[in-house]
Amino acid sequence: MREVEVATSRRSFLGLSSLVAGGALLGGRHRFSTYVDAPHGDVNEASISQLHAAMAAGSLTCEALVGKYLDRIEVLDRSGPRLGAVLELNPDALNIARALDIERNAKGMRGPLHGIPILLKGSIDTGDRMMTTSGSLALVGPPASQDATVAAKLRAAGAVILGKTNMSEWGSHRSYRATSGWSAVGGQTHNPYVLDRNPSGSSSGSAVATAANLCAASIGTETDLSIVSPASANGVVGIKPTTGLTSRAGVVGGCPTHDTVGVHARTVTDAAIVLGTITGIDPRDSETKTSLGKSFSDYKEFLDPDGLRGARVGVLRQVFAGFNSATDAVFNSAIEAMEKAGAIIVDPADLPTAAQIAQDHSEGTVHSFELKKNIEIYLASRAGLSVRTLSDLIAFNKLHAAEEMPFFGQELFLIAQATTDLNDPRYIDARRTCLSLSRDQGIDAALKRFNVEALVAPTGSPAWATDPINGDHLVSPFPTPAGMAGYPTISVPAGFSFGLPVGISFIGTAYSEPSLVKLAFAFEQATKIRKIPSFIPSLDVPSLKCPPLSRPR
């Protein structure tokens, strides 16, 4: 019905600069014939419940599962297509898995993540032998002294932290011209569907590793677009939670007003399982107090295959659609699928502030002020590093410009360095404007006006060709209302264009994750769009080939 209304354990950090200078950026040029050439095809697309069923049947152990993923990382990430998704492997992963097997046999399972290998974004602390670099050579050094809260929660649930993933260095907070998926530590991450295409960012490696079946699921972070955009570009589910639902303690961030920690998985079910594991109030992050009585430790209860039936869903058209014809084709088909599944489609259901958001610069101002303070708070927690302030990082990058800035600079760092403090009226006014335009005047206003449960919009366009010279060719509205608001978004695979994935996003008000999980799961079950990647080196588009020249007669 429709209503129409107005590894690094296998790759030393030593010599990283030579990897970049020597062409690691172009590592994905190696041809890799077919997906079935990869080892351990039995874990392809395996869900968390399927992995547990195999363990219960005695046909799989946690130690064997970790070994399978390590082998796949060696073949797909380190060689073959050289995805560049994994920064570092946990040298203790097999020992941890072996201990979890013994525990399961003796005491039973801790929960739904017992023995499940998870990768963490390279900006998330682990109090072990792995480093946290956020992709920057300046942070190469002694590991963090303790786990980030989300890492500690995963360990307590019995998950195996398999390693750290590559990312856009400093979460793309260093330069306007940053290339998504590139860092000085890890080089360039490649899109597993077409290797010369960009994986988007900043949680690039998290999405790519999940898409390529290098792990069961992964953890990413987002300020604006950094979980959902790579989810769309790499054909996986991405849950960007409400800011405050998950702790940011022990995570290199840039903007506490908007930053959040979320999940990449191949299915909504797996994403819901992981999300429930990492929620909860944390004394180390005061923002999590706002989640009191609004968070759940198990989001599986909201998985309803008939969840679209009777649900009123509003369609964002103005600004947030219509920016790319290929995306529009997928988006419109997705809306038809939702309608067929019983949703009441309100089209359009535009934000009253859509045009203002498109022209607004308040989010950037908030980022600049908060970046300076937040980086320095984080650096104070890391003993043994040579950098303590944003000024130190700027100096480090200048000193190591050949390795750190071969393709783009650090103008966003310089802008942030020039800010004062969070008592500056410019910051206070920008933050108020940013939240007002996106929340009570934006998302909340549209939800109320059109009486809809959630809003839906394209997550982004098909992936663009990676271009280290000119930076990203991002074809997507930015900033996004959910990013500005700190509100939740779930991106789900919705279709393909020229073999490249395109996702749609379900957007809601603060702490509306249960409703969004229900809608996203129902859409996923109604469409089952996701396909495994095949690592094509580049697109072969006949219309782009020049016809043979003929001499005029």
Image: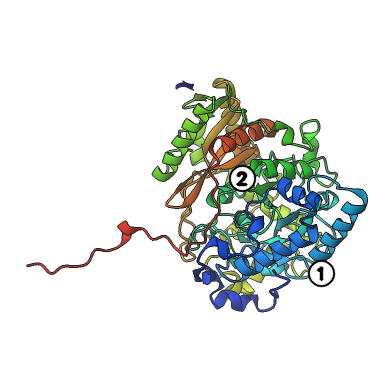
Residue shown at 52% from the left, 30% from the top:
338
> Where does the image place residue 191, in percent across and percent down from the top left?
53, 59
Viewer-proximal residue, 146 or 304? 304
Residue 237, label in figure:
2
Disc 1 residue type? Gly
* Residue at the disc numbered 1: 384
Q: Secondary structure at mark 1?
A: loop
Disc 2 residue type? Val
> Where does the image place residue 471, in percent across and percent down from the top left?
49, 60
Viewer-proximal residue, 320 or 98? 98
- Cα distance between the residues tagged 1 and 2: 37 Å
User: Can you say which quadrant of the picture contains the C terminus?
Assistant: bottom left
Residue shown at 85% from the left, 50% from the top:
156
Please tell me in which quadrant of the rendered image residue 516 appears. Answer: top right
Please tell me in which quadrant of the rendered image residue 376 appears. Answer: bottom right
Whether 279 is drawn above or below 405: the answer is above
Residue 225, label in figure:
none
> Where does the image place residue 423, in percent across and percent down from the top left?
71, 44
Residue found at the far left of this picture? 553
Tell whether 296 sits left or right of 516.
right
Q: Which numbered mark, 1 or 2, is in the foreground of this view?
A: 2
Tell whether 103 sits left or right of 57.
right
